[in-house]
Image (cartoon, rainbow, N blue to C red):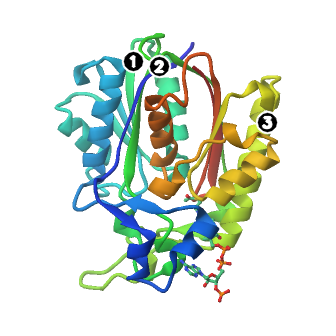
Amino acid sequence: MPAYICGVGFHVPAHTVTNHDLEQRVDTSDEWIVTRTGIRQRHISQGELTSDLGAQAARAALADAGLTADAVTHILCATCTPDSYCPNTATQIARKLDLRGRMAVDLNAACSGYLYSLQTARALVTLDPRAVVLVVASEVLSSRVNWADRTTCVLFGDGAGAAIVCGEKSGRGVEIIDALLESDGQYGELLTILGGGSARPYTLGEPVGEDFFIQMNGREVFKVAVRSMTDVCQRMLARHGLGVDDLDMFVAHQANLRIIEAVGKKLDLPAEKVFANVQRYGNTSAASVGIALAEGCADGTFGPGQRVLLTTFGSGFTWGAVLLQF
Ligand code: ACO
């Protein structure tokens, strides 16, 4: 049963924070951040919720697909920074789109959330080819960034990417050819947001500690990220008898330009086929590939006839690859 992405959209907060702005907050420099990560600025929420960004991205994706919200049958929200534990963020996106009576569920696979959700949407479309699944990957990571920790606060940004997945080749008509999604919980401690969960409950009146925020062993994450994304992409290509020459574009999780370039090199891809917008958005976790896809569709980077490979890597660890035919 084929599944298609018939529309894509994205939304980021208007407020930007440059590396020079961060120089005022922590002991860092534009030169260090650009050299180590490629990031020059990130968009940061000024009170907008994960569901606000998600609803805006959803509206853009619906417009791109030529659909109105009432066509949507299911809402999936990929996020690791939900509005709240309960209610889930998917119901609040549905509320903002004036949708009732639909299945609305959050999915947390950290930075791999967009690909995990595309695959879940594909499964829903296989169950019912008339399903029109709204996939929203939205994050307000700034709410869980320790702004006093220079090793993490320079890396992340806020934003949302959305896609409409359906069983009919309509709108953009991008076929989801295949997905390979994997995880290894043995790496759970290397990248965490612990505070507030059952592993680190807070008692009434207790101030939050550093574990309330993103904590990461950057060097280890870097190594496993490059290895895992390269490996899963190679297996995806082999599964379809494809070589890198058969790919028109390659989109890796936009965490760090050095990771993106390292994976591109290991796959033997020419630089011009390796998409990057991390310079302007930072690492937006689940939203990153959703934003990349929507931005690249809007500016013509991706278009009819192209074969595009997506890959992600995130806390858990989770990782995966999705092959698209435009
Ligand atoms: N400004 C200035 N100096 C800094 C900063 C900063 N913002 N951050 C760290 N440093 C210092 C360190 O303290 C260290 O100093 P020391 O040598 O005196 O101890 C030095 O810079 C080198 O630190 P490293 O951590 O070894 O630097 P590295 O080259 O590994 O780069 C980075 C750090 C950018 C975090 C890198 O490890 C990385 O990109 N890792 C992957 C992180 C990532 O992308 N995670 C997300 C992927 S998964 C997901 O998105 C959830």
The residue lying toward the viewer, choosing from 185 and 144, is 144
Pointer 1 with pointer 2, Cβ within 8 A: yes
What percent of the width, then of the height, locates residue 56?
Answer: 27, 40
Q: How crowded is mark 2: few (under 14 residues within 10 Å), some or many (20 or more)?
A: many
Q: Which amino acid does label 1 sit on?
A: Ala
Q: Which amino acid does label 2 sit on?
A: Val
- Identify the residue under disc 3: 235
Determine the secondary structure under disc 3.
helix
Q: In which quarter of the image is residue 31?
A: bottom right
Q: Distance between the residues labelled 1 and 3?
A: 30 Å
- Identify the residue under disc 1: 131
Q: Which of marks 1 and 2 is nearer the N terminus?
A: 2
Q: Earlier in the sequence, mark 1 or mark 3?
A: 1
**Mark 2 or 3: the one toward you:** 3
What percent of the width, then of the height, locates residue 29?
Answer: 52, 79
Image quarter for ligand 1 equals: bottom right
Marking on residue 125 = 2
The residue lying toward the viewer, choosing from 226 and 81, is 226
What percent of the width, then of the height, locates residue 203?
Answer: 30, 81
Determine the secondary structure under disc 2.
helix
Q: Earlier in the sequence, mark 2 or mark 3?
A: 2
